[in-house]
Amino acid sequence: NTSYDNNELKKNWFDLEAHKARQVGKYSREGEWLTRTPLPNLRPALQGLKGKKDLVGVECGVGSGINSANIYDNLDLKKLFLLDLNLPNVKPLSSLIKKNNVEFFQGNSLDQLHNLPDGLDFVYLDASHDFSTLLEEIKIVYPKIKPGGVLGGHDYEQIGVVCAVNTLMFNVWRHTQQKPNNFFFDSCRDEHPGYP
């Protein structure tokens, strides 16, 4: 079960005392993860793409499509690939996939990510939150992103995500012999319980 109401998933989220109002238990009890409220801002990882033309990008793990719709509305897209385990039977995703420049892949991310073209401007990962699966997702998409492109994601506060991202960072550092200076972490601005 990959839903936000999964207890196995929730136990790995930080329960920061300073953020009790946004704790996962409250978030889940009140059903906030089921809301279809549009996001107020483009998520930080993708902000630098605003103003660029004819972008080709991917969101992996789209859920109901709230973030997908935000990406679609705020970026100049030539093509947007969306991947998820579940069929798009809720709005805004069900409406979004009818657009000519949107293509939806249903299935396991490790299988579906191989179907993506090279030369991507961005990839936003928000599907699996366990270390080994996310690390494999990164291995598949990293070579598909063109130089200067963006690899971003969500839920960095989950232990599997932080470990996979740090593994990528340390390998880039080791390979280039230079400390990566373009990694950044920013807080969610959409009332998601995940802090960074």
Image (cartoon, grey):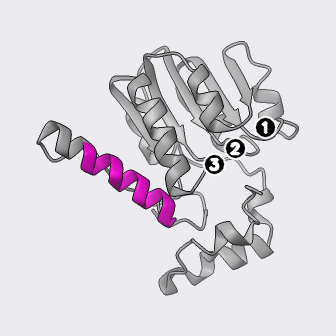
Say which residue label 2 marks. 66
Q: Earlier in the sequence, mark 1 or mark 2?
A: 2
Question: Residue 58 occupies which quadrant of the picture?
Answer: top right
Mark 2 in CB contact with mark 3 (< 8 angstroms): yes
Please state the extent of the stretch shown in magenta in the rendering: 157-171
Determine whether 85 is above or below 1 in the image. Answer: above
Which tag is nearer the camera, tag 1 or tag 3? 1
Q: Is residue 170 magenta?
A: yes
Choose between 71 and 142: the one closer to the eye: 142
Q: Residue at x 61, y 38 (%)?
A: 60
Q: Earlier in the sequence, mark 2 or mark 3?
A: 3
Q: Let me know if residue 46 appears in the view.
A: no
Label 1 crowd (10 A; few <14 / some 14-19 / many >=20): many
In the image, farthest residue toward the bottom: 17
In the image, farthest residue toward the left: 177
Q: Residue at x 70, y 78 (%)?
A: 25
Mark 1 in CB contact with mark 3 (< 8 angstroms): no
Q: Let me know if residue 39 appears in the view.
A: yes
Say which residue label 1 marks. 92
Q: What SS does tag 2 mark?
A: helix
Q: Amino acid at mark 2?
A: Ile
In the image, farthest residue toward the right: 89
Label the magenta part by its dominant secondary structure.
helix
Q: What SS does tag 1 mark?
A: loop
Q: Earlier in the sequence, mark 1 or mark 3?
A: 3
Q: Amino acid at mark 3?
A: Leu
Location of the C terminus (image quadrant):
bottom left
Say which residue label 3 marks. 39
